[in-house]
Image: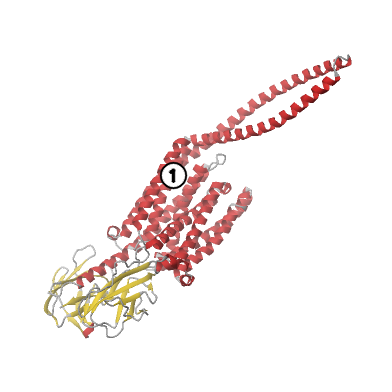
Amino acid sequence: MTQTIAPRVRTLVLLLLAAACALLAGAGPASAHAALTGSDPREGAVVDKAPAQVSLTFSESVSMDDDSLRVLDPKGKRVDDGKPSGTGGTTYSVKLHAGLPDGTYTVTYQVVSADSHPVSGAYTFSVGAPSETSVTVSGQGAGGGFVGGLYGVGRYVSYAGFAVLVGGAAFVLACWPRGSGVRVVQRFVVSGWLSLTAATLLLLLLRGSYTGSGKVADVFDLGLLGEVLQTKAGAALVSRLLLLAAAALFIAVLFGAYDKREDEERRDLTFGLAVGGSVVAVGLAATWAMSEHASVGLQAGLAMPVDVVHLIAVATWFGGLTALLVALYRGPADTPVPALAVSRFSRVAFGSVIALVVTGTYQSWRQLGSWTAFTDTRYGQLLLVKIGLVAVLVGVAYFSRRWTAQLAEATPAVARSAAARRAEKGEKGAGKASTKASGNASAKAGTKASGNAKVAEKESGTTKGSGTAKGSGTANGSGTAKGAGGSQRAAQLARQRAAVDAARQKRQRDADPNRFGLRRSVLAEAGIAVVLLVVTTVLTQTEPGRTEEEAKAAGTASAGSSAPATGAVTLDMPFDTGSQNGKGVVRVELDPARVGVNDLHLYVERPDGTAFDIPEVKVALTQKAKDIGPLPVAPDHITTGHWSASGVQIPMAGDWEVAVTVRTSDIDQVTISKNTQIG
């Protein structure tokens, strides 16, 4: 039975590794979690005179240093003062040198988003007219290269180590207290602690280079490490190391004093370990929640505790499942995992699934923001994969519960059968003892008779003294040698019997069809859980769907604003007044988008693309560079969701701001705007 299991285990493990490698290969460097949503001057713009400063607007707050935002002239020389400043929450600007000549200028940025991920990019604008430039921006990137790949490995290992540490300890404490004395389980939990500790130290050393230059030499820069310790991500990593020190004490008690206590004393210690272990587990999970996705964006105060619960539920399920698998396959034959422990874990896993569903639903709504983001964004697509894996995992877990129930029913019968075998063995032993006693009595009688004969013979003087002494000496020496050899032989036989008994017990354990079925289903669960953990880790490095859609909307507006000067301009502007049915998209079409008379068409659509009417819509045109406007435009309602105005006068060419005020009720309205080049 064991020989047929091993090839299957190896095959499944290889398949799991292949799936994990495929996901890792597709993950790539950490994606930008703060998207560039606007700039002034905008990308590709041609302005009449050099601006006094360059401003960038991101979807969330970012961290900058003196080199984070740079402006380069056509020859690659910096023309900014190197001191970026925030001007409005998510807008950052840097001042330019006075008297810049005409030509094409390159703006590069490399910042760290509020959820700890590096963001970089570049674009160009021109003064007077476009020109050739020696600046190349194709290689601009953050979080890539060897350091970025190593940092990604550290993230995967840290998540896996956390799951093994927390889930394995919870399995022992809540499901199988006697497992604290099983060496393979001890090694399993300790390996989780070592993996998480090593990965945390690696991430702390790589952090400065990962978000900066990307050079391996900077990993050992103590000055850079000091700067990292002052950041939110650095503080989270240091806090994780301190909590791991407390976790080491917890492990020492769990596998030391706890294992040596009797059942009554062990119950008293269980409560203290449960409270202390829960505090440490929550603290470790919080180091991720306070520094990544949950700490920024919508409802951060609620999202962080929800993320903590989500992480602990994942760890309890995945880590406990893997601990059960290790105990079933590698545990000693004389200490099998009891059916009661499996039943307890089944209940714990069920509670973890409920927590995952509730917290995962909230996280999906928060990170996606719309149903279309499930299919239109990478984050949504990965989330669909994760949901599918959870569904499959729950289905496999159902079969594990069936095997557990059958194993629990079979256990009393097995126990009775074992007791019967022991009783039968005892009867046979008693018979052997009786036979042995009878033989010993006969032997003693014969010996005594022989001795009497020898005495009689000695008295008659027929025995030779010297010969008798010699013979006696020979017999004694032979007896001593045989005694020593017999002792070694007995020890060898005892070892062989112990090995045979252990192999027999293992065969009997593995021959149980219920236990064999449970092992296969748990192995399948663990394999799916490994892939699930990999997908979850990739999700933490992927740009949320809500942010990606905002970036796409900004890119659409930018593309519309860079239309040819003599062609029509189309601007799509999403709006949300905050009321019921207050969401939609305004599309403004200006034709021919040049100096003089133009026609303006305005369309209002719901998020699903259907046209609808609103109480009021107004348009205003402004050219801030020339201090012109706002020029009001009052379009006429044509049909459902369509307004139009003719004879719209554009007095001069330049960068114009098109502002639209949308009112969806008596009190709910919002003004949205986009820039476009006209003339």
What residue is disc 1 on? Answer: 523
Q: How many marks?
A: 1
Circle 1 residues within 10 Å: few <14, some 14–19, many ≥20? many
Residue 310 at what x, y percent from top left?
43, 58
Residue 12 at what x, y percent from top left?
40, 44
Does 511 sit above or below residue 190?
A: above
Quadrant of the rendered structure where residue 647 is? bottom left
The residue drawn where x is 66% and y is 23% is 431
Q: Amino acid at mark 1?
A: Leu
Does 385 sit above or below residue 288?
A: above
Residue 327 at what x, y percent from top left?
51, 45
Quadrant of the rendered structure where residue 666 is? bottom left
Quadrant of the rendered structure where residue 612 is? bottom left
| Secondary structure at numbered mark 1 | helix
Residue 90 at what x, y percent from top left?
34, 75
Residue 103 located left or right of residue 312: left
Q: Nearer the viewer, residue 677 or 283?
A: 677
Q: Nearer the viewer, residue 98 or 505?
A: 98
One can see residue 275 in this view: no
Q: Nearer the viewer, residue 203 or 645?
A: 203
